[in-house]
Each structure stands twice: as C-alpha cells, then as structure tokens.
Amino acid sequence: MLRKSTTIATLGRAVALTLEHYGCDSRQVFEQAGLDIELSYNPNARYDSDKMAELWRLAAHTCGDPAFGLEVPKRTSQVLNPAFDAAFVSSDNLLQALKRLCKMFHYVSEMGQLQLTHVGDSIFLEYRMSAENRSILANESLDMLFGALIYNIRQTIEPNFSTKGVYFSRPKPVDSEAYRELFRAPIYFDQTVDKLELDAEMLTKPLLGANTEVAKLNEQIILDHLKRAERDEVVLQVRFHIISRLPYGEPSQDSIASMMHMSTRQLRRKLQELDTNYSQVLLDTRHEIAKKYLCQDKLPLSEITQLVGFSDQSNFTKAFKRWQDETPLDYRKRHNPAS
C-alpha cells in the first residue's frame, strides 16, 4: 500500500482564519473537504494532501475570490511551527535561510520539494513535484506558498523585498491585479515550472540579528521531528503488512517490501536510515500483538500461536519468554486474574 502524501494540519488553520475573514463558515467548508477542523489546532497533526487540495478549491469558491491563496499568507505566521520560523529569521543571509527552507519544507507538505538553482545574477527558487501531484495540487496553495515567502520576508526581515520575476504553471487568472500588488514584479503564467526569480546579490547580504547557533539548533529540531514522523509512518506501514500476513506464517522481508511496492533493498535502506531493521520491527510487532491477544481470555493459546506467526506453541512460548521474561500463561494470569 503506497503511503499518501500529507500536509501539516496547522496550515488549515490559516485557511480557516482567511475564510472567516471573508465571513464564511470555515467549519462547513472543512466538512465538505472531508477534514476535521479541530486537527488544525494540533501542531503534530497532518492532513491528507488530496483532501487539503480540495479544501483550497472549496475555500476559493466559497468566498468568491480567485486570489484567495494570496490572502492566506497574512495568517500563516500564526500557525506554522515556531522553530521553523526561527531557523529562517536567525540565518546569516536570505540565501542561507532559503537553503534551510528547502531542507525543511518536507515538514510543511510532502506534495513536492523546493530547489535552488543559480543562473547568472539570479537565483531561482523552484517548486518541483511529480506530474501526478501537480494534477492534484490546487493553484491556490501555490499562490499561498510563494505569497507567504514574500510576505513573511517583508514582515520580519526586509520591508522592501521584491523578486525579479514570478513564474506560475497555472493559467492566467481573469484578474491578476492582486498578484502584481503582492509580488511587485513581472508575473508569468502558463510556465513549465513554478518558481521565483531572486536577485543573488540581495540574497547574500548579511542580515541584522542573525544567530547562527540558534538557526542550527532550530533546524535540527525540525529535522529530528521529520525523522520521527517518517519513522512512525514507514514502520507503521511495515507493521500493518506484517500483522496481515502473520496468521499465514512468518512473513519475509521480501514479501513485505513487495506489498509496499518497493524493492527489498529500498525497504532495508529506509529502515536502516531510521535506525532499525526488518527483524527488529517483526519482533516488536509480534511481541506487541501477542500481549494484546493474551489479554483476551477467550482466545486459546493455540490460536494466538498461529496469529503471531508460529507453527508450534512451544516455540511461541520460548520466544515470548525471551521478549517478556515470563511465559504467555503467566502474562495472561497477571492481566486476567479470573482466567
């Protein structure tokens, strides 16, 4: 089962606040998109990116403003992770800040990635994604992304900051005045890549109040969070497939990798990057579900043996004693005194 991409749920709070600014019922729009608006208050929650794209489209339609995405940046600073903002503000210059942004952007959305390219006296910040994701992504979210970057730089670092050019793959809107007002630069629509063209000299000017140590620390906070989130997701998928196959015997790493639509080598590498391995995930999964089954006093030990992938009850007993330092029956009696 392929893992769906997700977006930080607190970004939904900015959408909700903007809807309310227009006098619209944000809760109703979230319900239409199939999203729980309460999650938008949770900094650790994530939304399915497909549903988030639908939220963007519904929000723009509901408030009747085709430039809805450009209004949202005024409220993003209230909802994005503070460490993310601090890492940006504490950088030595804007180029360093953008490099950090590219590295940490995965925290905000998994639909695509930001890349920097240097051409002559210009630096391009490009938003790259697969053709499939581009067909799903709402134009309003790209408006917000570029708009939020410019708006926040002006609010926190350089009030007169401007770009050399803005390039959108989206069609030109009927009224593009709001785009000209925000970006203060030539705007090109129907382009092959979504990107901002920035002045290289401006990006390398030192920033007042920069604190390299704070920036590095906050960057690490975000990267650690991403690693934990990725670990949770990858391991969760492996465990899900292991549980589904255990009743038929101990599943091999090859079979689980195939079910996850990746090669065994890819799965092994992903788990290694997350400081674990397939054998450990298999062991932890068996241990955890064995304890859950043993707490159900109506399940006979012979059935539990099969459910956790053992063909022989004595082998299961030996394994459980290694895991828990007590036999399955002792564990069951301790948790079900009446059994």
Image (cartoon, helix red, strand yellow):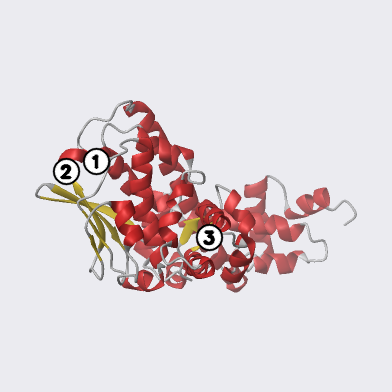
Left or right of residue 205, residue 149 in this image: right
The image's mark for residue 200 is 2
Which residue occupies the foreground of this view, 112 or 274? Answer: 112
Where disc 3 sits, the SS reads strand
Identify residue for label 3: 47
Is residue 310 in sight in this rendering?
Answer: no
Residue 20 in percent (x, y) is at 58, 56
Q: At 36% across and 53% down in the image, what residue appears?
A: 147
Disc 1, disc 2: CB below 8 Å? Answer: yes
In which quarter of the view is residue 205 placed? Answer: top left
Type of amino acid at the residue the image marks with label 1: Leu
Whole-angstrom CA distance, mark 1 to mark 2, is 8 Å
Type of amino acid at the residue the image marks with label 3: Tyr
The image's mark for residue 204 is none
Whole-angstrom CA distance, mark 1 to mark 3, is 30 Å
Left or right of residue 118, residue 94 in this image: right
Q: At 51% across and 63% down in the image, what residue appears?
A: 237
Identify residue for label 1: 95
Where disc 1 sits, the SS reads helix
First-in-chain label (3 vs 2): 3
Type of amino acid at the residue the image marks with label 2: Ala
The total of numbered circles placed on residues is 3
Is residue 167 in sight in this rendering?
Answer: yes
For the C terminus, the quadrant is bottom right
Which callout, 1 or 3, points to the residue nearer the camera? Answer: 1
